Amino acid sequence: MSGTLVFKRVAVGLVMQAAYIGRRGERLFMAYDANQIAVEPILASFVQMQQGVARTSTPLFAQLVAGFIANGQTSTQATLSATSFINSSTTTGELAINNIGNFARRIEDSVLSLKLRPNQQFGVITKIDNSGDSNYHAAQFTLRRRFSSGLGLSMAYTFGKSIDNQSVDPSEHHRAAGFRPPTHERQATFAISQ
């Protein structure tokens, strides 16, 4: 951790404070799915369905039918299963919110023929290692006013930036992409108190 602090008396009873805070985390423990589903094989069909192309005319539909046939269904049963899967309200919801990850997981759980997981004998394989890194930098500004009656007023503003390699997509497959802002980051805060 590093930090710098500067006080400056601005006027009678008014003090301004400025500070820098910096932190670095190295070799942090992180857990991720080493058998993560790859969405690339179905991405084009997913985008086509989002754009309004008939769901049963996408290449994915034919792959689903083949997958259900490989699971032991007749051609008619497989077509009905694939139609039901691809036209379900769950699929409609996933298309609406761009949730290709859950869509791919549902496909992988239904048919294995698309081979979306590197090792299909297993579901999630949680790998734990110490390859996590994080950085945090912030500037903090405080303005305080003391009144002769003993009452005080304080205003504070903080602007911070946090980046790490484990909050957004910690998969083995995407970790090389580098540092990204975490999903929980709040860059700026402002507070007034008495």
Image (cartoon, grey):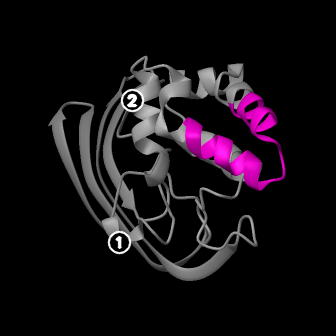
Where in the figure is residue 157, as x and y percent of width and height? 32, 35
Residue 191 seen anywhere in this rendered image of the structure: no
Residue ID at (49%, 72%): 172
Residue ID at (83%, 45%): 73
Mark 2 residue crowding within 10 angstroms, few (<14) / some (14–19) / many (20+):
some
When asked about the image quadrant of residue 84, the answer is top right
Q: Which one is closest to the eye, mark 2 or mark 1? A: 1
Question: Considering the numbered disc 1 on the image, is that residue within a helix, a strand or a loop?
Answer: helix
Closest to the observer, 138 or 7: 138
Residue 142 seen anywhere in this rendered image of the structure: yes
Dot 1 corresponds to which residue? 176
Question: Considering the numbered disc 2 on the image, is that residue within a helix, a strand or a loop?
Answer: strand
- Determine if the magenta segment contains residue 71: yes
Is 170 on the left-hand or right-hand side of 175?
right
Q: Is residue 176 above or below residue 50?
A: below
Residue at far front of view: 75
Dot 2 corresponds to which residue? 154
Q: Is residue 189 above or below residue 139?
A: above
Is 132 on the left-hand or right-hand side of 37?
left
Where in the figure is residue 64, as x and y percent of width and height? 64, 43
Residue ID at (59%, 56%): 114
Is 134 on the left-hand or right-hand side of 119?
left
Is 130 on the left-hand or right-hand side of 143?
right
Q: Which residues are magenta?
A: 61-82
